[in-house]
């Protein structure tokens, strides 16, 4: 196994100083990968992306250059190098504003952000690459949560727990009515492994919602779970809290049928308890999660300001 990471978020170890696996690393920007870099590999699992909606608003062209064009570039290099399987981390954000009913993979794609658009376009341009020798598959992940060795606190359940623990307030920036499917980071890893092992004929060029159907929650439900989990916390709605256009509930029937090796085990209650135990053990403070350490947008903007990244988010020097 080999990674390809330019380590923009190497400050995000959780807990700080924790051990990470010692994995060989190509250390290249995905936009600069070549065919020769990928020769000899059986599969590519492609996660690299700008993954923050506010960042997409600030630099929409860059989101497309990395998430869409960069993804297709890596896939074409992989195909030419003889890689047989390309597992793409797509997103349920593709559905965007989908209403109340459950949406399956054949549902209308209605992304509401540049991030969502970039994933839709990447899927569109990856699909024609499929043939008997090259198997791209698109895993449309629900919103991630959970404790990981490289932590994020800019995703919904993680952020709610962090606010609740450090301030006693569960900060709600919307009215809580939007629906979100969520998935634990460990279950995401299980999905990648299952997609690597699945029969190529069953998944070639196909998209799969990666979640459990019962793990669709309204944001206010997640807030209530956090309130029940974090001692002494209470829900606090922002004065301008209103509805969010991004609302979708997804079905997991297709992945359960065609990738039987995928068996997620987490739900929001268990995940909230894991997060609470972790931040309590670490002694998380507001400056940790509100600053650059565990927030993708804040870290990237700081790296640009320090001259370590250029305006195209390429490493300087």
Image (tube, helix red, strand yellow):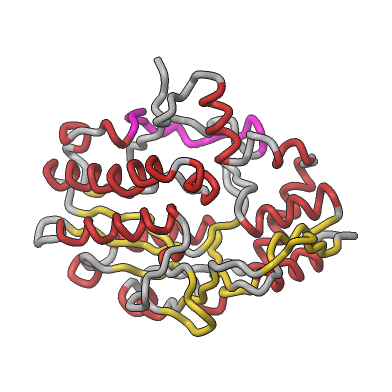
Q: Residue furthest front?
A: 240
Q: Residue furthest bottom?
A: 101
Q: Position of residue 94 (x, y in %)?
A: 41, 65
Q: Residue at x 38, y 43 (%)?
A: 61
Q: Residue 37 sits in which quadrant? A: top left
Q: Is 62 in front, or is 73?
A: 62
Q: Residue at x 50, y 42 (%)?
A: 58
Q: Is 241 in front, or is 25?
A: 241
Position of the C terminus by quadrant: top left
Position of the N terminus by quadrant: top left
Q: Reply yes or no: does residue 307 show up in magenta.
A: no
Q: Residue at x 70, y 73 (%)?
A: 221
Q: Is 204 in front, or is 65?
A: 65
Q: Position of residue 254 (x, y in %)?
A: 36, 78
Up the image or down, 300 lies above or below 174; here it is: above
Q: Reply yes or no: does residue 23 show up in magenta.
A: yes
Q: Position of residue 180 (x, y in %)?
A: 56, 69
Q: Position of residue 28 (x, y in %)?
A: 33, 29
Q: Which residues are magenta?
A: 15-29
Q: Residue at x 19, y 44 (%)?
A: 78
Q: Residue furthest top?
A: 317
Q: Is 315 in front, or is 204?
A: 315
Up the image or down, 276 lies above or below 182; here it is: above
Judged left or right of residue 152, residue 248 is left
Q: Main secondary structure of the magenta part?
A: loop
Judged left or right of residue 306, residue 282 is right
Q: Residue 10 sits in which quadrant? A: top right
Judged left or right of residue 119, residue 40 is left
């Amino acid at each position: 196994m080999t990674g390809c990471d330019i380590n923009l978020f190497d400050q995000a170890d959780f807990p700080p100083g924790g051990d990470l696996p010692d994995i060989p690393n190509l250390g290249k920007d995905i936009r600069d990968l070549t065919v020769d870099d990928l020769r000899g590999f059986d599969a590519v699992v492609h996660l690299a992306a700008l993954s923050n909606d506010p960042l997409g608003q600030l630099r929409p062209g860059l989101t497309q250059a990395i998430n869409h064009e960069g993804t297709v570039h890596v896939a074409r290099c992989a195909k030419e190098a003889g890689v047989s399987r390309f597992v793409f981390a797509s997103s349920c954000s593709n559905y965007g504003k989908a209403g109340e009913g459950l949406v399956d993979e054949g549902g209308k794609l209605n992304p509401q952000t540049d991030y969502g658009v970039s994933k839709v376009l990447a899927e569109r341009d990856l699909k024609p690459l499929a043939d008997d020798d090259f198997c791209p598959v698109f895993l449309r992940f629900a919103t991630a949560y959970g404790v990981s060795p490289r932590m994020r606190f800019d995703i919904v359940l993680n952020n709610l727990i962090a606010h609740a623990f450090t301030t006693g307030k569960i900060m709600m920036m919307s009215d809580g009515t939007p629906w979100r499917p969520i998935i634990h980071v460990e279950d995401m890893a299980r999905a990648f492994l299952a997609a690597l092992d699945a029969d190529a004929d069953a998944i070639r060029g196909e998209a799969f919602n990666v979640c459990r159907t019962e793990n669709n929650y309204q944001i206010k439900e997640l807030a209530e779970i956090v309130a029940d989990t974090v001692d002494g916390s209470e829900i606090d709605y922002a004065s301008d809290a209103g509805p969010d256009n991004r609302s979708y509930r997804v079905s997991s029937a297709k992945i359960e049928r065609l990738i039987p090796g995928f068996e997620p085990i987490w739900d929001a209650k268990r995940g909230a308890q894991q997060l609470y135990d972790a931040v309590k053990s670490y002694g998380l403070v507001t400056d940790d999660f509100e600053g650059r350490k565990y927030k993708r947008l804040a870290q990237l903007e700081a790296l640009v300001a320090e001259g370590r990244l250029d305006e195209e988010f390429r490493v300087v020097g």
